[in-house]
Amino acid sequence: MDFAEQVKSSVDIVKTIEQYVRLKKAGGSPRYTGLCPFHVEKTPSFSVHSSHQFYYCFGCGARGDLF
């Protein structure tokens, strides 16, 4: 396992993003939603997947992981 994978497996992406974006759990899934920090919006389109450790915005297409 390389260094990046070690960091990803030891840090919770939801807790990291929650420092900047208010997230709400989406039902019983491992997904959280919130307002996208990359563009102005009124309804949440920003999605954070805790089990896969990545985020995606359905509004502007921003995507990434901890890095």
Image: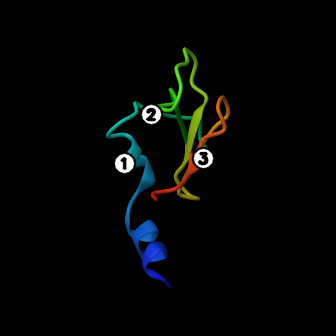
Please give left or right for residue 15 compared with residue 64 in the image.
left
Q: Which residue sits at x=45%, y=67%?
A: 8
Type of the residue with mark 2? Leu
The residue identified by callout 1 is: 15
- The image's mark for residue 44 is none
Q: Amino acid at mark 1?
A: Lys
Q: CA distance from mark 1 to mark 2?
A: 9 Å
* Sequence-first disc among 3 and 2: 2
Q: Is residue 34 above or below residue 67?
A: above
- Residue 1, image x, y percentages: 50, 85
As drawn, the residue found furthest toward the bottom would be 1
Give the vertical position of 37 relative to 55 (above or below).
Answer: above
Please tell me in which quadrant of the rendered image residue 57 appears: top right
Q: Which residue is mark 2?
A: 23
Circle nearer the N terminus (1, 2)? 1
Q: Residues within 10 Å of mark 1 (few under 14, many from 20)?
A: few
Q: What residue do we see at 36% from left, 48% from top?
A: 15
Chain-order first, disc 3 or disc 1 = 1
Q: Quadrant of residue 44?
A: top right
Disc 3, disc 1: CB below 8 Å? no
**Marks 3 and 2 in Cβ contact (< 8 Å):** no
Secondary structure of the residue carrying numbered label 3 = strand
Query: Counting other residues with Cα less than 10 Å from the Cα at mark 2, is it few (<14), some (14-19), or many (20 or more)?
Result: many
Q: Position of residue 14 (x, y in %)?
A: 43, 48
Residue that numbered label 3 is attached to = 63
Point 46% across, 73% down: residue: 4
Residue drawn at the location 61% of the way across and 44% of the way down? 29
